[in-house]
Image (cartoon, rainbow, N blue to C red):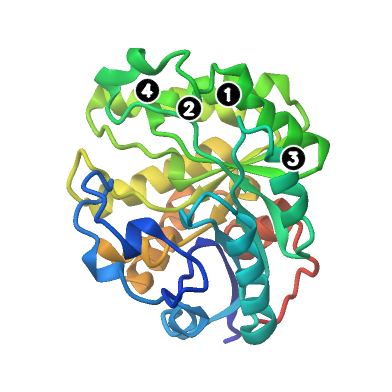
Amino acid sequence: MSEQLLIDSHHHFWALDGSVHYPWLEDEIDDHFFLGDYAPIRRPFLPADLRALVPPGYRLAGTVHCEAEAARREPEVETRWLTQLAEQQGLPVALVGWAAFADPGCETQLDRQRESPLFRGVRAKPVTAARPDQYAATLGAPGSLQDSGWTRGLRLLEERELSWDLRVPAWHLADAARALEETPSLRVILNHTGLPWDRSEAGLEHWREGMRALAANPNVAVKLSELGSPMAAWDEQQNIALLAETIDIFGAERCLFASNFPVTGLNVSYVTWLAMVEQAIADADAGPGARQAVLHDSAVHWYRLPDPRITG
């Protein structure tokens, strides 16, 4: 039986050797980290570590690195380091950087990172509420999805044909869908299954409404990743159901396998997460090409990877 090609469309690398500074890993602990105690991941995580996690039956054909909250002063430092790492070790094959959308220097930050052949887009997080009952207080705040000074960054991405990795809790998904009306050709990849943190009946219905609003935009895809929640205990069966529902909402061609390792490792192993996504693909009954799309082809399309048969 041949191996299944796999592209991991969202993970992080860090060496913690001074190459890139990560304040949240190397300085003070972030007491508000969404998964609680993260001491187990405050150690180097590099291509060999990721490759070692992939189980038999799969061949890791490539990965997409997502910015890892490096020091914000010069985001091109992380991009350059990752580009050198890829030259030396073969991963990642593409990367998503960071830029300060509201900063007058945003254009320069983007253009410096575009010097890397791996640079595909940006993950910049808007101001959001930590809980749904705090939502109203963030509306219109500086740096929010209603702040035109911040959303100008989306236009800069659109002009440069770069993508936006969107990461907001579920109660902001509909806001994101509205904000994207101003950049109709911007390619967007939603992170972490839309972060359905509130697992109450009302909370999940709010998540569904937001996911449908984003799915109505044909330029939005979603990563099947990270279902840890600060508001609910890990529930494997519920999480599989949410993954399957996401495939139903977006379609397999707009769903990308992603591990979010090493962070997701705080809750579950790589092997188990991959098995959960496989089960969700089967449960969604999305057609004979769904598995190949989710595990490989969707990432090739949405991140404009150079070859559908990348060798990693």
Q: Quadrant of the C terminus?
A: bottom right
Residue linked to disc 4: 206
Q: Quadrant of the N terminus?
A: bottom right
Residue linked to disc 3: 107
Which secondary structure, mark 2? helix
Q: Earlier in the sequence, mark 1 or mark 4?
A: 1
Residue linked to disc 1: 177
The picture places residue 230, in percent across and down from the top left corner, at 23, 42
- Give the answer, above or below, for where 10 lies relative to 3: above
- Give the answer, above or below, for where 307 lies relative to 196: below
In space, the residues marked 3 and 1 are separated at their CA atoms by 24 Å
Mark 1 belongs to which amino acid? Ala
Q: Residue 264: tell me if it is visible.
A: no
Depth check: give the residue in front, 52 or 111. 111
Q: Earlier in the sequence, mark 3 or mark 1?
A: 3
The picture places residue 128, in percent across and down from the top left corner, at 40, 28
Task: Determine the residue positioned at 22% across, 28% down.
Answer: 200
Which secondary structure, mark 3? helix
- Is label 4 in contact with label 2 (beta carbons under 8 Å)? no
Q: Earlier in the sequence, mark 3 or mark 4?
A: 3
In space, the residues marked 4 and 2 are separated at their CA atoms by 9 Å
- Give the answer, above or below, for where 125 lies relative to 175: below
Q: Nearer the viewer, mark 3 or mark 1?
A: 3
In space, the residues marked 1 and 4 are separated at their CA atoms by 13 Å
Residue linked to disc 2: 173
- Is label 1 in contact with label 2 (beta carbons under 8 Å)? yes
